[in-house]
Amino acid sequence: MDRPPEAFMHVGIVHFMLHPEVQGGDGPILESVEALATDGFFHALEVTHVNDDATRAELARRARTARLALGYGAHPALLLEQLDLSSADPDVRERAIEAMLRGVDEAHELDATLVGVLDGPNSAPATDDDVEPALNRLADSLKHICHYAAGLGIWIALEQFDREIEKCSLLGPIDLCIRVSEMVRAETPNFGLCLDLSHLPLLGEDPPTSVRKAADHIIQAHIGNCLISDRSHPQWGDQHPVFGEPGGVNDVPELTAFLRALFEIGYFDKDLPTAMPLVSFEMKPAPYQTTAEIIGNAKRTFAAAWARV
């Protein structure tokens, strides 16, 4: 590719995966963001809940000064509290919706125009008969959230997770993701899907094929790796090891194919809620790795793939 990535996209990174210690809303939020704000490779940062109002305001200020676009990931609120937007328990579902509405409010304070969600952990259906009712409940929850978010100029992106390895979520398979997206968009157009290169292999799906299937619904993309061949590995499952990790699924060829598929479907020409189409790294340090090593791996892997696109 002759032109640089920034001509087509904002390359971002998921801050709360790179720094898992901030997922509860506290910790070295500003310090860790500062290091990324000075790195010209990244043009977007996906953050999550921040407990302290002053810290949140300062985060927004620093991002504006650095010309760093912010996205908001509401996933930790659902995962840490074990909430489910598709739950058959009305109380659980209501708590999940309320948590997402709080996330939308925070995203608005941060000038973010996109909020990422999932349906919830351990929401995979017990039987085939449970699928349809769960899909309907999930769609109703998402419509509620989207109606609220639309008033603030915010879109909602549903990210698919594994069905039976770690998160055990309803969505899940790309065909079901598309069905839910169609159901939600019929009433609230400020909705779409986030496809994650590291999650699709956990579902037994070929990422480029899933990208082509969901072409009309993709409004966000994540890139990363996963490891499913060795259960004894400390980053087995949905733990986002570095690209090229021995036993891992994704490396330069897989990232190249994913980026080519995004070009093929016209993702980088779409009219999206973000200033530029987002392609964000989702990588998590192992206990023996530093964030600097992770960032170096991400940048070098992307450069190698970009040269082949």
Image (cartoon, rainbow, N blue to C red):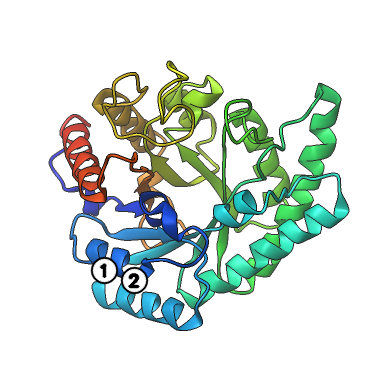
Residue to which mark 2 is pinned: 30
- Residue 53, label in figure: none
Percent across and percent down for residue 290 are 25, 47
Q: Does the rendering let one see residue 187?
A: no
The structure residue drawn at horizontal position 45% and vertical position 76%, both measured from the top left corner, is 56
How packed is label 1: few (under 14 Cα within 10 Å), some, or many (20 or more)? some
The structure residue drawn at horizontal position 43% and vertical position 16%, both measured from the top left corner, is 229
Q: Does the rendering let one see residue 257?
A: yes
The C terminus, quarter of image = top left
The N terminus, quarter of image = top left
How packed is label 2: few (under 14 Cα within 10 Å), some, or many (20 or more)? some
Left-right relation of 45 to 87: left
- Residue 34, label in figure: 1
The furthest residue to the left: 2
Left-right relation of 177 to 197: right
The correct choice, above or below, for 100 with respect to 213 in the image is below
